[in-house]
Amino acid sequence: MSDALDAALRLVRAQTALVRRFDSRLSGLHGVSLADFTLLLRLGQAPGGRMRRVDLAETLGLTASGVTRGLAPLERIGLVTRETDARDARVAYASLTATGRRRLAEMLGTAEETAAEVFASPAWNAGDIALLSALLTRLGGTGLNRH
């Protein structure tokens, strides 16, 4: 097996382990998945807590139908609402509700704690984390705090 394939497979396994860890914590404490959280976080970072659904899909690397499927349960539990543009009824926005903003703040605390546990010292130092972040960016992985 080539080093490149080995590295790619290790990255996939690491990603799977991270998703499982975040899903477990977020689901257990807040009833949402990591995918739900990332969607809510991106909405929370958008001006006014809302985005056009098509822009949300692009930002998250999902299809429009994938975003619609992801938003549906969040709408049902009152974290997100659907808004239409007053000027163009064809344009749909996803918007955080007041409850969604409050719950997102709680989820963010849990996600920060989980990330701190994953990258705890002495196994990881600030330089290691910065290097990993830079390498992942080279692979196309951009953080949600980048617009």
Image (cartoon, rainbow, N blue to C red):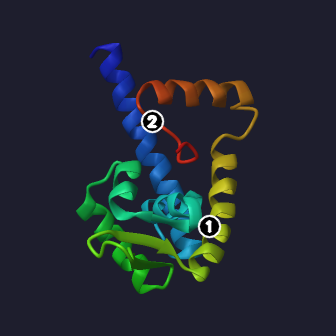
| Residue at (55, 79) in percent of width and height | 97
Q: Is residue 26 left or right of residue 71?
A: right
Amino acid on which the number 1 mark rests in the picture: Met
Q: Residue 138 placed where, x, y %? A: 46, 24
Q: Which residue is mark 1?
A: 107
Name, please, the residue furthest toward the front: 87
| Residue at (51, 79) in percent of width and height | 79
Q: Which residue is mark 2?
A: 141
Name, please, the residue furthest toward the top: 2
Looking at the image, residue 108 lies above or below residue 117: below
Q: Which one is nearer the viewer's eye here, 22 or 103?
A: 103
Q: Residue 110 placed where, x, y %? A: 65, 62
At mark 2, the secondary structure is loop
What is the total number of numbered labels drawn onto the structure image? Answer: 2
In space, the residues marked 2 and 1 are separated at their CA atoms by 22 Å
| Residue at (26, 71) in percent of width and height | 90
At mark 1, the secondary structure is helix
Mark found first going from the N terminus, 2 or 1: 1
Q: Residue 52 placed where, x, y %? A: 39, 63
Mark carried by residue 75 = none
Q: Tell me the quadrant of the picture where the N terminus can be found.
A: top left
Amino acid on which the number 2 mark rests in the picture: Gly
Please tell me in which quadrant of the rendered image residue 141 appears: top left
Q: Residue 30 placed where, x, y %? A: 57, 74
